[in-house]
Image (cartoon, helix red, strand yellow):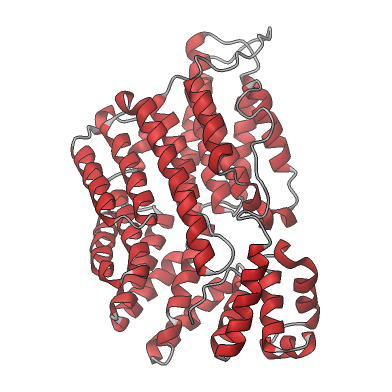
């Protein structure tokens, strides 16, 4: 099958019509309710199909005749040609870079906590990209100072309470890689709201700076947890909040880290439509991400530790990989290794400790794997890097461990090492079951689909049976 489809109601309806089936016959063939098929037609692109239904439609498309697939492809291409690259022209909410920072944070938190669960599926549509992303951020970074909040006469917190809040933020960051999003995300946002409210009061300069840095740390954790919960628009806004707070706290490394988070999010976004159209959009997002990284390097490169510089170089390599520039990818990867070799852990802030030799290997290995999907010759190098990451991972990094194992399995499949892929896959399934991560689920879907061509192998069929319950959990 030449097409890779992001299934929404629009694509599902196009497939039904290409197959020449009524809603009733299509529902019967797919093993789903007729009302579900009708809902897909009614809601169109506004509904994103769950993993179970997407897998069913993938199979139906693969079994279609060449004429039917051609009709489907023509219908979807025609639909995409009538739409903008992004279904909604996303812009920053008013004042996100200019209004008083505590007011911006309060508005975002209040809106997030009351967000209707049914709206989450459309969260991608609100991600800001292109000029609308880069120009306001660059203009704000180059400004002399942030908006000064009004002074309120009140009793501020003491030094000990500020330290306790910092410790709480540290614990929440450890939660992120262990558990992903879910209910713990609400706890982080609640703590962020409390710290933001404290910043409305007057404090001595050092206490204010520590509270503002804590706000930045919590906002960044909320961003990654929101991302892991599939709330892409909210994740980007929390990253923006983290950037603002880190700059207010005069913490250049934390500010650069938050900008790098925004870049990584763009590099990881899923996009709608057929493969050719998706590649064009991914290229544009990679260019945006590369520009974000260069902004961080230009603004803060002389004020951050070697470890933080190494992290920025890996994001740079990631963007070059997406752009199909392997030489530039390897050059940026080499710079990341050189910077990490110069690192001094005693000089690093604690929050960059996640970026170690394992994270470097895992990140570069994952990017080589993406390149291997287009050019299988990169699969061996991907497996080598991911293998290093697996060996070096510290205990407790559940999300990273699951991504490592799934990545290694896919690399072995690309190499044709099916038995070895199955052996690794059994470990991967166990690791996936220990984390509630949208990123891990998306990776699992990719790997599950990659096993389809080997389904006649008994051990592969057995492994797919083990994967299915994990896929159904998010359908």
Residue 188 pos. (x, y %): 58, 39
Question: What residue lies at 69% left-to-right and 77% top-to-bottom?
Answer: 14
In the image, residue 108 above or below residue 268: above
- Measuring from the top left, give residue 281's x and y in whole percent: 52, 56
Asked whether 460 or 38 is in front, the reply is: 38
Closest to the observer: 387 or 330? 330
> Residue 65 appears in which quarter of the rendering?
bottom right
Q: Is residue 357 visible?
A: no
Front one among 396 and 223:
223
Q: Is residue 364 left or right of residue 121?
A: left
In the image, what residue occupies the spot 60% across and 16% down? 147
Whole-percent x and y of residue 433?
Answer: 49, 66
Residue 404 in view: yes
- Across and down, in percent, residue 181 comes to 56, 51
**From the viewer's perspective, is residue 95 above or below residue 50?**
above
Task: Please give left or right for residue 444 compared with residue 421 in the image.
Answer: right
Q: Residue at x 53, y 26 (%)?
A: 244
Q: Against 209, is 422 above or below?
A: below
Q: Nearer the viewer, residue 115 or 135?
A: 135
Which quadrant is home to the C terminus?
A: bottom right
């Amino acid at each position: 099958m030449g097409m890779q489809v992001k299934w929404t109601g629009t694509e599902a309806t196009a497939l039904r019509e290409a197959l020449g089936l009524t809603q009733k016959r299509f529902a019967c063939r797919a093993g789903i309710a007729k009302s579900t098929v009708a809902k897909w037609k009614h809601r169109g692109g506004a509904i994103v199909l769950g993993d179970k239904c997407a897998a069913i439609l993938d199979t139906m498309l693969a079994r279609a005749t060449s004429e039917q697939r051609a009709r489907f492809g023509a219908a979807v291409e025609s639909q995409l040609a009538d739409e903008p690259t992004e279904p909604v022209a996303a812009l920053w909410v008013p004042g996100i870079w200019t209004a008083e920072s505590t007011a911006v944070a309060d508005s975002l938190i209040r809106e997030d906590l009351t967000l209707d669960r049914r709206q989450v599926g459309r969260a991608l549509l609100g991600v800001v990209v292109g000029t609308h992303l880069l120009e306001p951020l660059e203009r704000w970074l180059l400004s002399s100072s942030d908006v000064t909040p009004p002074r309120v006469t009140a009793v501020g917190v003491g030094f000990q309470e500020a330290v306790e809040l910092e410790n709480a933020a540290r614990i929440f960051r450890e939660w992120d890689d262990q558990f992903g999003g879910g209910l713990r995300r609400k706890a982080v946002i609640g703590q962020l709201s409390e710290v933001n409210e404290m910043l409305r009061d007057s404090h001595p300069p050092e206490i204010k700076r520590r509270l503002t840095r804590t706000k930045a740390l919590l906002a960044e954790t909320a961003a990654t947890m929101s991302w892991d919960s599939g709330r892409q628009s909210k994740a980007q806004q929390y990253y923006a909040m983290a950037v603002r707070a880190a700059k207010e706290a005069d913490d250049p490394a934390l500010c650069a880290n938050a900008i790098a988070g925004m870049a990584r999010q763009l590099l990881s976004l899923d996009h709608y439509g057929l493969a050719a159209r998706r590649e064009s959009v991914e290229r544009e997002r990679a260019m945006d991400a590369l520009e974000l990284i260069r902004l961080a390097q230009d603004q803060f490169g002389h004020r951050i530790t070697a470890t933080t510089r190494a992290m920025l170089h890996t994001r740079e390599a990631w963007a070059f990989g997406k752009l199909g520039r392997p030489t530039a990818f390897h050059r940026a990867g080499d710079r990341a290794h050189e910077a990490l070799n110069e690192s001094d852990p005693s000089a690093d802030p604690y929050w960059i400790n996640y970026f170690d030799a394992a994270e470097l290997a895992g990140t570069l290995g994952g990017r080589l794997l993406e390149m291997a999907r287009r050019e299988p010759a990169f699969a061996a190098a991907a497996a080598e890097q991911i293998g290093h990451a697996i060996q070096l991972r510290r205990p407790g990094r559940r999300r990273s461990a699951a991504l490592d194992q799934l990545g290694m399995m896919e690399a072995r499949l690309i190499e044709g090492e099916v038995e070895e892929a199955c052996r690794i896959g059994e470990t991967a399934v166990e690791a996936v079951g220990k984390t509630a991560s949208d990123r891990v689920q998306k990776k699992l879907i990719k790997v599950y689909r990659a096993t389809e061509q080997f389904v006649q192998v008994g051990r592969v069929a057995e492994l797919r049976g083990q994967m299915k319950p994990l896929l159904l959990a998010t359908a």
